[in-house]
Amino acid sequence: MKSRFNSLKVQRSKGLLPRPLRERGILLPITYYLLPALLFTFYFLPFATSPAFAQKMQVSTPQSQYKYQQQVYQDLEKEKYERSLLPESGYMTTDDYEEKSKDIPNVAKEIPEYKLPKDIKMKYVPTPTYKLVLYNNPPGTPELHIQARFKYDHQVNCTGVTSPNMDIMVYPVVYYYASNQCSAGDLFMIVLDQSLSYLDRVKRANIVKRVPTPILSTDKDIVEKYMFRTITPIDFSPDGTKLIAKEKIGNVNDGIWQTNLWVYDFLTQKGRNLSEVRDAIRFYWKNTKNLILDEKRWDITPLGFDENNPDRIIVSAYGYTGKTPQFLGNWSIDVNGEQSQLLSLFDAKATVSINGLKLAQVGVVEPAILLEEEKKQDKYLKETRKRDKKLLKKSEKIRKQALAHKLKEMKKEENETLHEYNKYQNTSGPTGTE
């Protein structure tokens, strides 16, 4: 017994046991485990038996689930309204992204009017003025004007021609392939906006609204080096239903080899190479002068539609065997490639109708007029901003009222649904039936 007392005394001196319990020999688990459990029980027992504590431990019911669901819907409506007041952000839901990512047809795209950039250091920036002029004037002179010398793959959009009805525009495109230093071409069509004036139709024409498929195309074969193929519109027929174009084929180091005459019918949407006129010219000179033109360098120049017969096209033929081109006659051919005729061997002039139009700059706006227009524009912008601000406030007010009305309706529907459910529960039997 004395040895046990001495052991407890040593433990007490080391601070291992509380003094009262060590002297009596009571074990540690009673102190460190049982006492906290008793304190916890005596402390929380009054709360566990109180009605308020029992109220917080609610059991999920159909009514509470329905209320929670309706609250979620109402919060979503509030969030949607609050988001509508914020500026558009790049953060959006998947549905919003898919809605904004829908492809817009070219016809429905809005093209803003081009305005010259203004330098704040310049008091006056010349603004050009335009007018519509005849395109094929003089006849047969339209050419592609490409000023830069290409060194890389490139695409150039050239001057377009508008139909006499001012409903469509046709413009050529040249593609340059640097790998073989050769080129090819297409003719595209743009449907003009009929709601604008004639001048604005052409000024506002944009390649974004072009018909995707070209109406005429050259061969896209780029195997032979230094070859070029281009296609140039010449003129429309008087009724605007047909277009003639010339296709030039040649070599960069050797010049033009051949010019082909093309006609495109907008009613049938088909193009045709009128090679019959070249065959007729070769046949005539071989049988009359025993001259084989294929052994010489010669070519044709399309002039336009015959003024006396709009179904026929006039071309001029020239030989290039010396310093001065030799006139080989004026010829005409039907738009269907039939009935090639010799018009004249001596007079290069021809009665050709000029129908297509193009946009040309005729001058610049005077500084005084431009300054007055700028003042009117500034005044209009101020009034527009003021009006837009009022409309924005009005729109926000309407949306806020709409939100309040919708939340009121949702709350009303919720109360009616709960009322019907409670009524059904009170009138039902033990098994849920009357």
Image: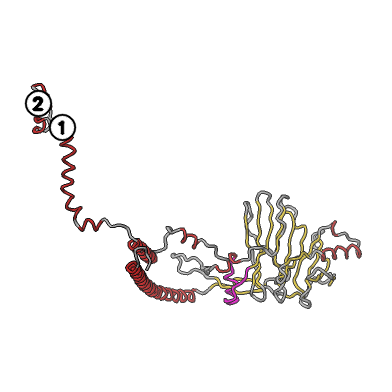
- The numbered disc on residue 9 is 2
Question: Picture coordinates of residue 355 (x, y %)?
Answer: 70, 75
* Start-end of magenta stretch: 190-206
Residue 242 lies, with reference to residue 173, above or below; the image says below
Residue positioned most to the top? 3
Question: Picture coordinates of residue 360 (x, y %)?
Answer: 61, 71
The answer to whether 50 appears left or right of 377 in the picture is left
The quadrant of the picture occupied by the C terminus is: bottom left
Secondary structure at badge 2 equals helix
- Residue 92: which quarter of the image? bottom left
- Residue 76: which quarter of the image? bottom left
- Identify the residue at image location x=81%, y=65%: 317
Crowd band around label 1 with a 10 angstrom C-alpha radius: few (<14), some (14–19), many (20+)? few
The answer to whether 359 appears left or right of 286 in the picture is left
Crowd band around label 2 with a 10 angstrom C-alpha radius: few (<14), some (14–19), many (20+)? some
**Which residue position is annotated with label 1?**
27
Q: How is the image coloured?
A: secondary structure
Q: Which of 339 and 27 is in front in this view?
A: 27
> The residue under label 2 is which amino acid type?
Lys
